[in-house]
Amino acid sequence: MRMRAAVLEEFGQPLEVQEVDLEAPHAGEVLVRLVACGVCHTDMYTASGADPSGYAPAVLGHEGAGVVEAIGEGVTLLEPGDHVVTLFSPQCGECVHCRSPKTNLCLAIREEQNRGHLPDGTTRLSRGGEPIRHFMGTSTFAEYAVLPEIALASVSREAPLDRACLFACRLSTGLGAAMFTARVEPGSTCVVFGAGMVGLGAVAGCRLQGAERIVCVDLSEERLALASGQGATDVMIGGPDTVAHVLEMTGGFGADYTFEATGIVAVMRQAVEAARMGWGLCTVAGVAGKGETLDIVPRLLITGRRVAGSSFGGVKGRDQVPQLVDRYLAGDIDVEPFISHHLALEEVNRGFELMEAQDGIRSVIHFDTQGAT
Ligand code: CU
Ligand code: ZN
């Protein structure tokens, strides 16, 4: 079939919205009609060429939500009409990691996904017979996408898809960091560094876990106001004194749980140092640049602090994204304040500009309309 998609032709250049070909799903694959897709920093990072593992031409986008249109041979997990959220972090349910409750890092299709292929080593995307690669196994800056069935979460049909798409990436990452990686205990004190989408999700996750005190640190008053809306009890402009302030607030001990959601290694260090001696757990959810290292004074670890990493919030996508969407539907998670701009696919580059200008938290692309609502 023919469809419109935003293609990364050349690093450092705007994406080009154009007609491309999409082949029908092969065995184990599903054709999804996208309804909405968030514009994420990771898309912009890859488009810029800063990611050494990036490739072009490729169709970017990985925060999609839509409706199953057709299924390939042998597909058992989904049927046409199902509402789905795309999973760059799939869940095969069978590999050694999927069978362990300790991790969400499914091993099933990683290598081919990293090469921009579907699991059988080929692409469904092409143009004039020449293959175009898939991005993060999703490629959702497009009217349609073909994905492996294990890379789709089936969510409630009651959830508006232009809200559900937020659960495809950073919101779930933040929520999950608090709920599934750190497993914050009721009554605890938490500090969240960064009030972008991941940090705001972590604030909400701490609240859902019953934390008593949630401190959010950021450089923007505007974002800190959003953090208060998600349940932060205290907000703080970040700086060199942040750790001292946290220690002051906690009788000199530090927080039970800290979360790093900026990707800046100097902030990660602060997040470790702000964790309580004895049992403080620092969860790193931000993604640092390739080759960067994190400095930790070993004495901090000997005296009982722990550091954990969290990819996609430890969320096992097919099982737990639907649960998070249900909590949104139940009124436990307020996603409206995250959506700052509504765009048409043709305006995808504007989504990058807004992100660069730190204007709002999330732009959402709508495929069924001709743009702004
Ligand atoms: Cu993302
Ligand atoms: Zn797996």
Image (cartoon, grey):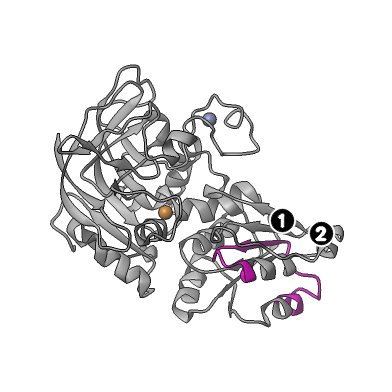
> Residue 170: x percent and y percent?
46, 55
Could you tell me if the residues under marks 2 and 1 are in contact, i.e. CB atoms within 8 Å?
yes
Q: Write down the residue under mark 1.
A: 307
Task: Identify whether 2 is placed above or below 188.
Answer: above
Q: Name the residue at 53% across, 59% down.
A: 204
Query: Is residue 218 left or right of 22 when viewed as pictured?
Result: right
> Residue 218: x percent and y percent?
54, 75
Amino acid beneath label 2: Leu
Magenta stretch contains residue 88: no
Mark 2 secondary-structure assignment: helix
Q: Name the residue at 31% across, 44% down.
A: 139
161 vs 271, nearest the viewer = 271
Amino acid beneath label 1: Val
Mark 2 Cα shell of 10 Å, populated few (<14), some (14-19), many (≥20): some
Query: Tag on residue 301?
Result: 2
Query: Is residue 253 left or right of 232 when viewed as pictured?
Result: right
Between discs 2 and 1, the one toward the N terminus: 2
310 vs 139, nearest the viewer = 139
Task: Identify whether 105 is placed above or below 56.
Answer: above
Q: Name the residue at 76% across, 76% down.
A: 247
Image quarter (top left, top right, bottom left or bottom right) of the C terminus: bottom left
Q: Is mark 1 within 8 Å of ligand 1?
A: no
Q: Give how far apart the Cα atoms at labels 2 and 1 are.
A: 8 Å
> Residue 330: x percent and y percent?
43, 49
182 vs 98, nearest the viewer = 98
Query: Which portion, as a residue range, is magenta?
Result: 246-267
